[in-house]
Image (tube, rainbow, N blue to C red):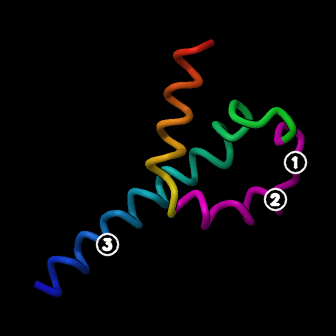
Amino acid sequence: MLSLILTIVALYLIAGFLFALIFVFHWVNQLDEQAVDTPISFRLIILPASMLFWPYLLYRVITKKNSV
């Protein structure tokens, strides 16, 4: 049972990491206009939070694209 939980958590974090890489370098500009000219250090700071909250951020990106 513990191995199943750890596997699910690992898959969530792997998916979050892959999403976060795309999000912080491309999609963050769509959600926040002030992030357009931010340095790489800012993007690296928001990377861990983007990994954890990737389902919500993905929802925001999808709904933002549909509303434009």
Question: Which residue type does callout 2 highlight?
Answer: Phe
Question: Which residue type does callout 3 highlight?
Answer: Val
Binning the other alpha carbons within 10 Å of mark 1 as few (below 14), some (14 to 19) or many (20 upward) gives few
Q: Residue furthest toward the bottom?
A: 2
Residue highlighted by disc 2 = 42
Residue highlighted by disc 1 = 38
What secondary structure is marked by label 2?
Answer: helix
**The stretch drawn in magenta includes residue 39:** yes
Question: Residues in magenta?
Answer: 35-51
**Residue in the picture at 41% in, 67% down:** 13
Main SS of the magenta segment?
helix
Location of residue 68 (image quadrant): top right
Circles 1 and 2 in contact, beta carbons < 8 Å? yes
Picture disc at residue 11:
none
Location of residue 57 (image quadrant): top right
- Residue 64 to residue 67: above or below: below
Question: Which residue type does callout 1 highlight?
Answer: Thr
Left or right of residue 27, residue 19 in this image: left
**Residue in the picture at 49% in, 52% down:** 54
What secondary structure is marked by label 1?
Answer: loop
